[in-house]
Amino acid sequence: MYCNQCEQTAKGIACTTVGVCGKNEEIADIEDVLIYALCGMSLFAHEARQKGIVDEDVDRFTMEAIFSTLTNVNFDSERFVVLINKVVELRESLKTRITEAGGKVDFEHPAAAFTPADSVAGLVEQGAELQFIPNLDSDENIRSLKQTLLYGLKGIAAYTDHASILGQNDPAIAGFMYEALSALLAEGLTIEACVPMAMKAGEINLRAMELLDAGNTGAYGHPVPTSVPLGHRKNKCILITGHDLRDLELLLKQSEGKGIDVYTHGEMLPCHGYPELKKYKHFYGHFGTAWQNQHKEFPNFPGPVLFTTNCIQKPKEEYQERIFTTGLVGWPGVSHIAGKDFTPVIDKALAMDGWQDDVDNGSVMVGFARNAVLGVADKVIEAVKNKDIRHFFLVGGCDGAKPGRDYFTKFVEQVPDDCMVLTLACGKFRFFDKDLGDIGGIPRLLDIGQCNDAYSAIQIAVALAGAFECEVNELPLSMIISWYEQKAAAILLTLLYLGIKDIRLGPSLPAFISPAVLDFLVATFDIKPIAGTPEEDLKTILG
């Protein structure tokens, strides 16, 4: 086992026996086999594209398979066996179609003819022999760039899968994925050859987030500022976590009129701002904070919990029987809903006591995506020109359990009263319930949404730059980004593709970034590790 794809990598190098996420050697090695098989299939899929062969089913499956290997998504070995066998089946089908079209099928790389073992134990043995990550390249800098690309691809796959569920697709995304996965197998690459591919990943991820934004807003309307209760009311209840809006909509429809309230957890919080979801009267409030606190929080929720995408941890025995997964999420022994009939979740809620009292724990505001913010852009611009607003800080990203993340709480607490804080993703839970007041009636803390709503943040920045007739890097805007997993890697590549500079990244830098690659990023994009105190960084930024 060798896994260093997340921020909590053991000893800042790699997890080699068990991952901090709960991934064991079995899952890690099988995931490596899946990615290796996908790289082999991509050789043919990329060649098929050159012959005009585009298969939407292959594209869709590829995104799902890659998404399954993200941190905290699927821990069920048997489901990976099915995925690996499907990869080989699709590879051979593509091979036949390419041959009929007169294309190339004689690839020399072993991945092109990989035969998976017929058991979990056999696949684990193959994964251990592959040593996929260490063997990406003998040159640590090329290996570093290939890993950066691979983890960016995983983030792209996640956003593309979400967008596809909502009917938003662009075949160019899958086309790039095949090209990039094939490149991971290439030998003798140079840094000059690898960097453009990583930047292209950033461009493709921007497109994926654009499609997902179109899917979310097209189906559920543009988010509007909304107050969300943090307490609860006496009633049966269901908690939904993850990121998937369609699953939430289906759960709301199926539970309507049954005497059950639906609460959000984690990155589902921003869903309260969507008009088409707000209309459900039993869509009530928010419970808990970020993904890493579920062991402490879930025992206190008196109803079932539905996981819709990544962020699952090994459930504690005391509440495992009321955990349900759907979509790509999986944990051995946990009830999985393969379709979208959430009757088992609803029945479990009806069988449990639910909340027995009414409790007011205050509320938080959500719904400040690009439409809401740009709707008051004239006030924002006037406030900046009048020096009522001195600076904007985008503080957000992934949360995690690693020490040092209290930096982000302390940073926001010390942001001067004449500055605005924009936030997104689960990193917001370090400070989401802080009352920062307002500037001219505009809340100083603006929740833009989920991690994919980085697209909204980008559109806000671009619009403000246009209004002030300057470049984005010339705006009074600083990005203080926390990261954890691969969607964050994809978003970072998007920001770099857009030429955004002076990003502060932490609480630690990726273990897969070699010193030479880090030097390149610092020299080219002025990326800064979060190394000082909030006081020091604020003083540096604000002068």
Image (cartoon, helix red, strand yellow):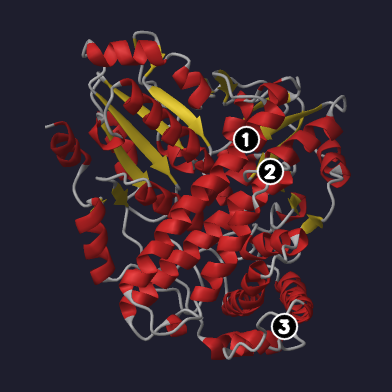
Residue identifier under label 3: 120
> Gap in Å between the C-alphas at discs 1 and 2?
7 Å
Q: Amino acid at mark 1?
A: Ala
The residue most toward the front is 102
Q: Earlier in the sequence, mark 3 or mark 1?
A: 3
Amino acid type at mark 3:
Val
Q: CA distance from mark 3 to mark 2?
A: 35 Å
Which label lies toward us, 3 or 2? 2
**Residue under numbered circle 2:** 168
Q: Residue at x 44, y 53 (%)?
A: 202
The amino acid pointed to by label 2 is Gln
Indicate the position of residue 265 as horizontal and vertical percent values. 61, 39
- Residue 201's place in the image compared with 109, above or below, is above
Residue 236, picture quadrant: top right
Q: Is residue 312 visible?
A: no
In depth, the one of 269 and 452 nearer the eye is 452
The residue lying at 44 percent from left, 42 percent from top is 427
Query: SS at mark 1?
Result: helix
Q: Is residue 350 left or right of residue 423?
A: right
Q: Are marks 3 and 2 in contact (CB under 8 Å)?
A: no
Tell me if mark 3 has few (under 14), some (14-19) or many (20+) residues whose alpha carbon lies within 10 angstroms of its own.
some
- The residue indicated by pointer 1 is 214
Q: Residue at x 69, y 57 (%)?
A: 329
Residue 220 on image: x %, y %: 69, 28
| Residue 72 versus residue 233 in the image, above or below | below
- As drawn, 204 above or below 35: above
Say whether marks 1 and 2 touch (CB < 8 Å).
yes
Residue placed most toward the observer, 35 or 121 = 35
3 or 2: tag closer to the N-terminus: 3
